[in-house]
Image (cartoon, helix red, strand yellow):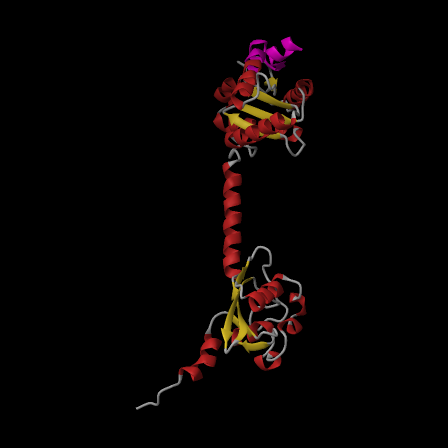
Amino acid sequence: MSATISPTSLLPRTLDLVNCGLVVLDSAQRIVLWNRWMAARSGYAATRVHGRSLFEVFPELRGARVEKAVLAALGAGVAANLPQGQAPAPFPLREAGSFDGARIEQAVSVTPFTEDGERYCLIEVRDVSGTVDRERQLREHAETLRARSYGDGLTGIANRRYFDVALDRELRRAGRTGSPLSLLMMDIDSFKAYNDHFGHQQGDACLTAVAQALAAMLKRPADVAARYGGEEFAAILPDTTLEQACAHANAIRAQVAALALEQAPAAVWPVMTLSIGVASFDKARLSDAAALIAAADRALYAAKRGGRDRVVADGAAIAAA
């Protein structure tokens, strides 16, 4: 029959088997317990640190959140969990056996307790590097998916979904600050004739070429070039008056014409052209997305009726000027 094993004799080995760092400090901040996990990742054996101040072993912890948490635990008996985002790697700990690798990212908790009338605190250090990496990968994946959901798969510029988000954002900003904001609605002239004559594959190439020409003309960070649908494009121009937007629209129209993409025989013009309608934010009558888009659309259709390959501004705005 085997002898009964005392729980006390099992304690040191048990603490060494725990898969996290365990440090116990006495009321003078001296180390009284330092498990094998800590030794393997700090490079300090327990015999080297016993009886020394934690802040003598790791001077960089002075004045940091770890010291504040230890003082609160030993002084007022307050427990604490240190947020990872503010101090992802407070202790200079590395993978076991690594002396020059990156620090492991840590979750740290400090818990006070009393033994024989004296206050101590237990510091638990957990390696959360894997969790942080997974969270980072998930964030990057989510950002990639969001970017894909906002991009037009064919042309590479923004899609209608992103256009709606951006226009709403810029309208709110214009309403708040009173800054000008203009919208261009653009349509490739005689695109059905082009598609019918050259085929859908060539039609897709045409859409991409026009989209890239449009994007190249919008150089400011806040400008947005978007495929609105089919052969229709849109441009959001923050801090741009109606007059400035018309000048920019004419430059875009000229840029597309300069591509010299041969048109179908049934088209009005011999090369690919754009018709563009322009409207600008007006707090009294064009202060929401639907109204602003409708005004730019009316101007676009006026450009179509007027012979295509031209820019027409919102008629109500011109009449009021």
Answer with the quarter of the image where residue 246 lies: top right
- In the picture, the quarter occupied by the N terminus is bottom left
Q: Does the magenta stretch include residue 308?
A: yes
Q: Can residue 50 be seen from the camera position used here? A: yes
Q: Where is residue 35 in the image (x, y as percent from the top left)?
A: 52, 76
Q: Where is residue 67 in the image (x, y as percent from the top left)?
A: 62, 65
Between residue 122 and residue 35, name the one nearer to us. Answer: 122
Q: Bounds of the magenta span?
A: 300-321
Residue at 65%, 24% (x, y): give it.
Answer: 178
- Quick check: 5 left or right of 217? left
Picture layout, residue 212 above or below residue 92:
above
Q: Position of residue 156 (x, y in %)?
A: 56, 34
Q: Residue furthest front?
A: 117
Answer with the quarter of the image where residue 63 lies: bottom right
- In the picture, the quarter occupied by the C terminus is top right
Q: Where is residue 317 in the image (x, y as percent from the top left)?
A: 62, 13
Between residue 1 and residue 4, name the one nearer to us. Answer: 4
